[in-house]
Image: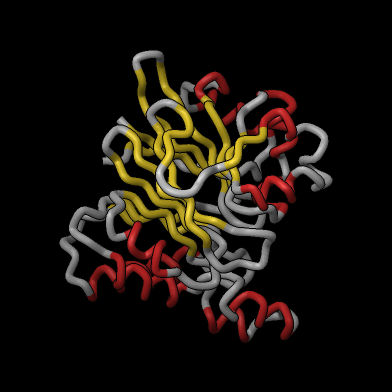
Amino acid sequence: MVRFLSFTSGSCGNCSLLLRESPAGPAGLLIDAGVSLRRLKRILTENGLSTDCLKGVLVTHDHLDHIRHLGAFCKSLSLPVFATGSLHASLAVHTFTRDHIASCRRVLPEGWNEIIEGFEVRYFPVPHDATETVGFAIRTEGHRFLMMTDLGEVPAEAMDLARQADTVVIESNYDIGMLLGGSYTYTLKMRICKGSGHLSNDDCADAIRAFYHPGLRNLFLCHLSGNNNTPRLAYDSALEALSDLKVPEGSVRLRILPRGEATPLLTLD
């Protein structure tokens, strides 16, 4: 059995958990570390888990909403931190990680690799204005999981992996009308919407239309803007894409990953 939990998703912080059952008990990979250790422990406890189930952390990129508490995770939990070489070079000197990450450093090789028992991981680059930004394809217990967040557009490699995934977590950051009509400066608006920022609801919907396949079971929308989007707008845009494809009702679980609060512990069919 494979389960998923989002602790929080958005510019307020990003952190999620992919969990598999093993003979020795549940084993999980964290993706990013944008939630405090206290909050992490509390939510795990509420779901009948402890930090003992955590076997490592995957890092998508070095923006603060994704790594703010990574140093604390390293100091208190001594979890291996899996990231690309260039990301680790950045984390080694970053104020929030430099003091505690050295002993936890694990450089991800290219291609598919079993980084801990039961989890095969492949990273892929995505366009975003950080040192380097990657998404992750993960295989465990026969389930194919894909996470892509903070990306200005969906590159071909990501699209190909999404066409093979049972679960896709994809950014649906902003509504273009709300962004352009909002209070952000012109420079910030262009940074968000010009290819190396974030995916709009429309971009996300177009990607869904391109990567949907009959094996897709779960579609989770992440990293919604608190200023330039609403859960209803993001949900309806993705639902329209599925409707356009005549996807049978109920065959894909469509869910928003909320800002500032955790999801239930979701079993991935």
Residue at horizontal 48%, vertical 51%? Answer: 123
In the rendered view, tell whether residue 266 sits above or below residue 20: below
Residue at horizontal 65%, vertical 41%? Answer: 35
In the rendered view, tell whether residue 249 sits above or below residue 31: below
Residue at horizontal 48%, vertical 56%? Answer: 124
Percent across and percent down for residue 82 are: 58, 39
Side of 203 relative to 65 (left or right): left
Is residue 120 something that shows in the picture?
Answer: yes
Residue 119 is drawn in which quadrant?
Answer: top left
Is residue 7 something that shows in the picture?
Answer: no
Percent across and percent down for residue 209 are: 30, 72
In the rendered view, tell whether residue 9 sits above or below residue 2: below
Residue 221 is drawn in which quadrant?
Answer: bottom left
Percent across and percent down for residue 90 are: 74, 50
Side of 197 relative to 126 (left or right): right
Residue at horizontal 81%, vertical 46%? Answer: 93
